[in-house]
Image: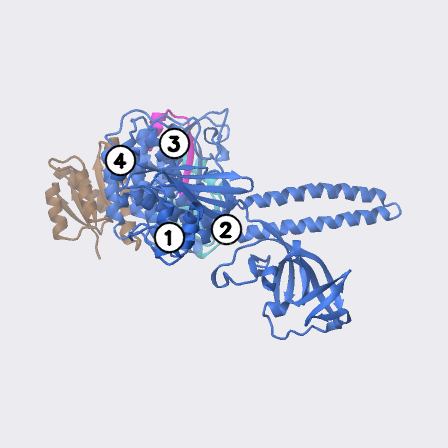
Chain colours: A blue, B brown, C cyan
């Protein structure tokens, strides 16, 4: 079901995008094919669960689209009705995600939309559907080189109950020259095998004229796809369209993979020493040379691997953006406003963590734009603006950052009003507020408790403010700012890192816990014998090279144990010497475990805001490593 | 509990043929008959009907619109429409009402698929 | 009855209909390793074909029906890997 929800969202997004295009240009064939395919696939998956109202509604949508593909002229209203069905599916997906079931009124709601679509579809033309030149499904390899008509028949799950015998139907096809029968879904646990749930996909090739084939499948036409095969290009994938294949992988596994790639870098460096050692051996020169050349080759491959693993985490913004049109339509509808939403830059790829973390803050900003930004129709008319407001959500790459903007052409934000509000809410004194320039005044909107809405409504409410948006951006390692002009509109700009930056860490243990320290601040690690320690202004210190370096017992600072005494083992102390705030400081630790590259995650939950912690990261064994912010620890 | 099949056809002869075919396939099914849509609706109102086989071409309301009405009331009932006239529009409407087709003239073989499927559905807890 | 068990062999005889899928599936599930003999089979309902594909028993016998023999038998005797599409 989880998989269904994920795929369902993608298919809804695909269909919505294509339908939006079709509403603007009803003759866009590629968009028509695209949304037909998406709806068809979506419908197919509903059969696997008990989602009859969704299946029935999508079936009606598919039929309407099929009729248009077959040559009936398609109008914007047709596509708007199908879009209504797709929006309904999206809402049902929300319900499935939340409650695990369709809402109680699903059947009635689905039927209502179905009825509207049926009205949109007058009697189907007799016009023959144009056969795709190549099938848009992957043909069985056994059919390679055959010519004729390829048939793909996916019987309904409950077809046995309706009295259908799909094998008999296919067997009755004239001039059958090839047949393949496969499970539609993997058989799974045969313990629970259901003998009467049809789980077959039947593919066949027939040399008969198309009309005869169609006649054979007449009663199940809704479950059959046909395509012309030519011997020249058998089974070529759909009309040159390059579809990106995707695979879902647990993010933790990818992190693990990244760490392994790093370790490989270290491991392969060992080969250099080995090569040198081999060359030094009597008669070992040739072997050494060979090792070196192999090492160079490995070096290149490991480098490529490293880069490739880094890219795995990148995901396009498209699925995120695709959720906004419906939400914008609903919000605008609830507010009685007319708003056009433009999206741009969906193809930009950023770290998956960032894509996931952006939904809530972006949605919040979008709602604000619709609610507080875009003015009611009368006011827009009075201001000489077009009645429909325009909200643009755009993304663009800027170096290793991504800039995402939500811009509206609404009333904008009046700095004077913010100043007054800040004073009224007790955020600032009058003088302090007046001393702020306009930009800083507008920035006050991110202060907790300050919202420009003077009334509470169902759309934005007043509970969650822009401070939450700013906090969310910060958690993702980014910033959010607001600008605009009174009367001309507002722009909320997020600047975020494109990748979660890898930080090199040294891992140490202290009081039985492991901690990470930023490696770039570490100068050296050393063993300092107890007799080298001196006391300087009541603090421990030691001579390091030509200077005296203060010694900090790390386990005291992290509060692991109260016994702050030096560990006397062997009379020497394990010390990590690091630059902290422009000075060298020695940190006594129990042991130094190793080094690693890690994507530092901002802290959340209980630990958020804990002083001295820079973040956390996942260890290869799945445990969480806390990363210390040494400067903050000492302050 | 026994299974009751309702056979609706305006022709007495057709009802006899259908009835015999059902009897050959499912001898223990109880068969009741109606000669038009109104009579059929009266029957389903007065007793439990598990399966319905309807002639498409009847004076007054045709079998397909009867099937649509029965489907509204009995979401799970196996319903078949018997017809010799397979137009695409009829197929589409029957599909929408989740009704099966039985070719006319009705034979034991032509009815077998629907009757077997109906028997399975009535037996199955899923249905 | 068109599904009969004879020692380690299940015989499918005559026209196997949709109802036969259930006894066949339970036999194949209860006793792995049974062989299915299609020698006297005259037709297989899709539900029966599906059960044979899912449980993937060894299939013997050559039915006389041409569709069964030439198109369906190779699918049951060929791709033996359960759960995989013959691609």
| Residue at mark 2 | A476
3D distance between C-alphas at marks 1 and 3? 28 Å
3D distance between C-alphas at marks 1 and 4? 41 Å
Q: Quadrant of residue A8?
A: top left
As for residue B97 lying within the magenta part, the answer is no
Give neighbour class at mark 2: few <14, some 14-19, many 20+ (Cα, 10 Å).
many
Secondary structure, mark 1, is helix
| Residue at mark 4 | A381
Nearer the camera: disc 4 or disc 3: 4
Q: Earlier in the sequence, mark 1 or mark 4?
A: 1
| Residue at mark 3 | A31
Q: Earlier in the sequence, mark 4 or mark 2?
A: 4
Q: Earlier in the sequence, mark 2 or mark 3?
A: 3
Residue numbers of the magenta segment: A200-218
Q: Quadrant of residue A164?
A: top left
Nearer the camera: disc 1 or disc 4: 4
| Residue at mark 1 | A97
Discs 4, 3: same chain = yes
The image shows residue A518 at horizontal and vertical percentages of: 63, 56
Q: Chain of mark 1?
A: A
Q: Nearer the viewer, residue A108 or A359?
A: A359
As for residue A214 lying within the magenta part, the answer is yes
* Residue contact at pointers 2 and 3, CB within 8 angstroms: no
3D distance between C-alphas at marks 2 and 3? 35 Å
* Residue contact at pointers 4 and 2, CB within 8 angstroms: no
Instruction: Classify residue A535 as left or right of residue B77.
Output: right
């Amino acid at each position: 079901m989880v998989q269904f929800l994920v795929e369902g969202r993608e298919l809804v997004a695909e269909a919505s995008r294509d339908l939006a295009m079709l509403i603007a240009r009803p003759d866009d064939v590629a968009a028509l094919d695209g949304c037909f395919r998406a709806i068809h696939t979506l419908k197919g998956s509903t059969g696997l669960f008990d989602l009859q109202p969704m299946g029935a509604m999508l079936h009606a949508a598919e039929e309407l689209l099929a009729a248009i593909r077959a040559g009936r002229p398609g109008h914007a209203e047709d596509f708007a009705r199908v879009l209504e069905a797709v929006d309904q599916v999206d809402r049902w997906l929300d319900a499935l995600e939340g409650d695990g079931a369709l809402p109680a009124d699903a059947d009635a709601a689905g039927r209502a939309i179905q009825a509207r679509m049926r009205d949109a579809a007058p009697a189907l033309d007799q016009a023959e559907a144009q056969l795709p030149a190549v099938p848009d499904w992957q043909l069985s390899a056994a059919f390679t080189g055959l010519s004729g008509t390829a048939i793909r028949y996916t019987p309904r799950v409950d077809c046995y109950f309706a009295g259908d015998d799909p094998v008999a139907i296919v067997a009755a096809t004239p001039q059958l020259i090839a047949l393949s029968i496969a499970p539609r879904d993997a058989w799974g646990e045969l313990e629970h095998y259901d003998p009467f749930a049809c789980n077959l996909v039947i593919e066949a090739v027939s040399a008969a004229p198309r009309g005869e084939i169609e006649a054979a499948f007449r009663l199940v036409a809704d479950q059959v796809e046909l395509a012309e095969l030519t011997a020249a290009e058998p089974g070529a994938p759909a009309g040159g369209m390059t579809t990106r294949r995707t695979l879902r992988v647990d993010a933790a596994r990818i992190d693990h993979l990244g760490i392994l790639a790093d370790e490989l870098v270290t491991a392969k460096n060992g080969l250099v020493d080995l090569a040198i050692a081999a060359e030094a051996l009597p008669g070992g020169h040739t072997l050494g040379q060979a090792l070196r050349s192999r090492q160079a080759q490995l070096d290149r491959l490991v480098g490529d691997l490293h880069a490739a693993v880094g890219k795995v985490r990148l995901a396009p913004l498209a699925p995120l953006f695709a959720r906004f049109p419906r939400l914008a339509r609903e919000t605008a509808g609830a507010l009685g406003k007319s708003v056009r939403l433009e999206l741009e830059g969906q193809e930009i790829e950023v770290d998956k963590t960032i894509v996931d973390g952006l939904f809530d803050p972006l949605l919040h900003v979008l709602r604000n734009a619709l609610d507080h930004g875009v003015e009611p129709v009368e006011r827009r008319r009075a201001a000489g603006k077009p009645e429909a407001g325009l909200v643009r959500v755009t993304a663009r790459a800027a170096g290793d950052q991504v800039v995402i903007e939500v811009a509206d052409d609404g009333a904008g934000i009046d700095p004077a009003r913010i100043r007054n509000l800040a004073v009224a809410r007790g955020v600032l004194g009058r003088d302090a507020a007046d001393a702020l320039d306009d930009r800083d005044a507008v920035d006050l909107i991110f202060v907790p408790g300050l919202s420009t809405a003077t009334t509470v409504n169902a759309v934005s409410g007043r509970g969650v403010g822009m401070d939450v948006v700013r906090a969310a951006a910060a958690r993702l390692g980014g910033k959010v700012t607001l600008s605009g002009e009174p009367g001309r509109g507002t722009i909320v700009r997020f600047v975020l890192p494109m990748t979660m930056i890898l930080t090199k860490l040294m891992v140490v243990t202290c009081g039985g816990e492991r901690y990470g320290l930023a490696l770039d601040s570490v100068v050296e690690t050393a063993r300092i014998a107890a007799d080298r320690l001196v006391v300087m202004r009541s603090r421990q210190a030691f001579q390091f090279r030509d200077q005296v370096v203060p010694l900090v017992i790390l386990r005291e600072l992290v509060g692991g144990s109260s016994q702050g005494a030096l560990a006397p083992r062997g009379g020497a102390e394990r010390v990590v010497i690091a630059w902290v705030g422009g000075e060298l400081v020695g940190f006594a630790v129990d042991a130094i475990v190793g080094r690693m590259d890690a994507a530092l995650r901002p802290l959340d939950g209980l630990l958020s805001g804990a002083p001295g912690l820079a973040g956390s990261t996942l260890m290869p064994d799945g445990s969480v490593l806390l990363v210390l912010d040494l400067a903050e620890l000492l302050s | 509990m026994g299974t009751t099949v309702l056979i609706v056809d305006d022709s007495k002869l057709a009802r006899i043929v259908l009835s015999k075919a059902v009897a050959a396939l499912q001898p223990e099914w109880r068969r009741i008959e109606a000669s038009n849509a109104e009579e059929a609706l009266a029957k389903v109102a007065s007793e439990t009907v598990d399966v319905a086989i309807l002639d498409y071409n009847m004076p007054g309301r045709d079998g397909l619109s009867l099937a649509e009405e029965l489907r509204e009331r009995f979401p799970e009932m196996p319903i078949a429409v018997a017809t010799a006239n397979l137009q695409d529009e009829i197929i589409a409407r029957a599909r929408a009402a989740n009704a099966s087709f039985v070719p006319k003239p009705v034979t034991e073989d032509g009815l077998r698929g629907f009757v077997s499927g109906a028997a399975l559905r009535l037996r199955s807890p899923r249905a | 009855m068109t599904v009969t068990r004879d020692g380690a062999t299940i015989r499918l005889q005559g026209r196997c209909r949709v109802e036969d899928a259930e006894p066949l599936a339970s036999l194949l599930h209860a006793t792995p390793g049974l062989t299915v003999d299609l020698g006297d089979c005259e037709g297989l309902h899709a539900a029966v074909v599906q059960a044979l594909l899912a449980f993937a028993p060894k299939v013997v016998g050559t039915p006389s029906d041409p569709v069964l023999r030439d198109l369906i038998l190779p699918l049951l005797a060929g791709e033996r890997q359960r759960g995989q599409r013959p691609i």
